[in-house]
Image (tube, helix red, strand yellow):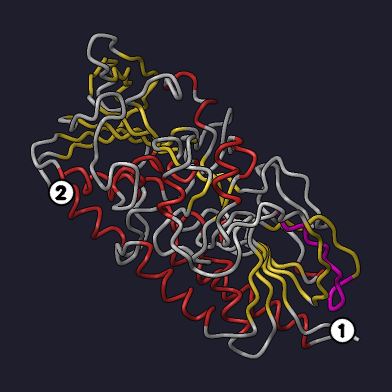
Amino acid sequence: MSSQSILVVGGGFSGISAALEAAEVGHEVFIVEKTAFLGGRVAQLNKYFPKLCPPSCGLEIQFQRIRNNKLVKVFTLAEVVGISGSAGNYQVKIRIKPRHVNPGSADLSGLAASLSKDLPNDFDFGLGSRKALHMDMPFAFPNRYVLDKDACSPEDLKKLGACEVVNLDDADKEITLDVGAVVLATGWKPYDVTKLTNLGAGNIPNCITNMQMERLAAAFGPTKGAIVRPSDGAAPKSVAFVQCAGSRDENHLNYCSYICCMASLKQAAYVRERHPEARITIFYIDLRTPGRYDNFAKKILSDPKIKIVKGKVAAAVEDPGTGNVVLTVENAVSGLKSDETFELAVLATGMQPSLAGEKLPFDVAVDEMGFVIGGDEKGIHAAGCAKIPLDVMKSAQSATGAALKAIQTVIGR
């Protein structure tokens, strides 16, 4: 007998959208998310297109829909480790890591703050720190802390063991789910900026990535929304945005990442809102603002303090005396090469599929970049940025399409 249930791998915006589309027409859906919380990359943004809403705006609505629908079952800290069967009748093995915090929404902020160690905060892309007991965002789903037990000192463990909400004996477990179809909504990751050695990535404190800029601008980010230089906390008076940092480059990502130009224009607006005297320069190869976003681009670029320069940034170095970033730019219009200095530089790093370089438990084809290019005939359907670089709106549309395909797979068996 075929299963009518659907597995969604990935709990970002496209995964949540696909799951809700299927569940709200009567299908049991399992969301498997490898991190401790749903939301994916959208949760890390300050604002997202098309309405320039904060992530809580869209995500809290989606989380409420999940809470209200008993057909959606969520597994966090979970990964697919094996799959057998065929379309309509898959058995999927899931490994779930321990959360070490019992169900509920207890406020453990005081206990977390009392722990001894400060750890790098991956959610903030290393710009801030966190404790071993933490919650990534105030509107997190599940609204429940997670504990990195291995990062605790013996004194911390003793303190944590006295809290009835904490379960230090929590352990890995495996479950098997019977599903008829799978939606791969595994999302994207920022391209590894340390590979961009010519742009000083990782070596120049005031040369950050576009996702780090989102965290600086976010109200619940490491600086509570203050856009400042990582080196000294000063407000930058000049900011450069370097487009196609790793994208459209045969040595890195050989494709356009679609969102980078729009993201930089949006972030230029962040800077101008917070620092009205700051001057901004955007260095680009081609400025791509598809469809209705063209009007947004015109509005941003009408600001006299925002300048665009068609040219490739060849190198970035630090001025050791000031911490400023010196960019070597080849102007494509004038043909001149020059060095220009900025107090802060933002690299528009590209979108790389999360599956790139990963060993997949699914029998699906991916291209040389890691995007899914097959699987529909097997009842395994890709959604969102697992398939192609997309913005949030188009990711949601893609998720609807994948959900419909998954439904057709299970009802057609």
- Image check: 296 left or right of 147? left
> Which of the labelled discs sits on residue 2, or is there none?
1
Q: Secondary structure at mark 1?
A: loop
Q: Secondary structure at mark 2?
A: helix
Cα gap from disc 1 to disc 2, whole angstroms: 55 Å
- Asked whether the beta carbons under mark 1 and mark 2 sit within 8 Å of each other, the answer is no
Asked if residue 239 lies in the magenta stretch, the reply is no
Residue positioned 46% across, 24% down in the render: 202
Give residue 47's quadrant in the image.
bottom left
Query: In the rendered view, does 192 fall on the left or right side of 55?
Result: right
Q: Which region shows up in magenta?
A: 86-97
Is residue 302 toward the left or the right of residue 309 in the image? left
N-terminal label among 1 and 2: 1
Picture layout, residue 403 above or below residue 150: below
The quarter of the picture where the N terminus appears is bottom right
Q: Residue 103: x, y in percent?
A: 59, 68
Identified by mark 1, the residue type is: Ser
In the foreground, 133 or 140: 133
Q: Quadrant of the C terminus?
A: bottom right
* Image coords of residue 350 (percent x, y): 48, 41
For the stretch drawn in magenta, the main secondary structure is: strand
Residue at the (32%, 44%) spot, across then down: 264
Rendering coords of residue 134 (x, y %): 49, 50
In the orientation shown, which residue stands out farthest toward the bottom?
A: 26
Residue drawn at (75%, 68%) of the image? 376
Q: Identify the disc placed on residue 410.
A: none
**11 sits to left or right of 91:** left
Relative to 31, residue 170 above or below: above
- Work out whether residue 166 or residue 360 is closer to the camera in this orientation and state it: 166
The residue where tag 2 is placed is 273
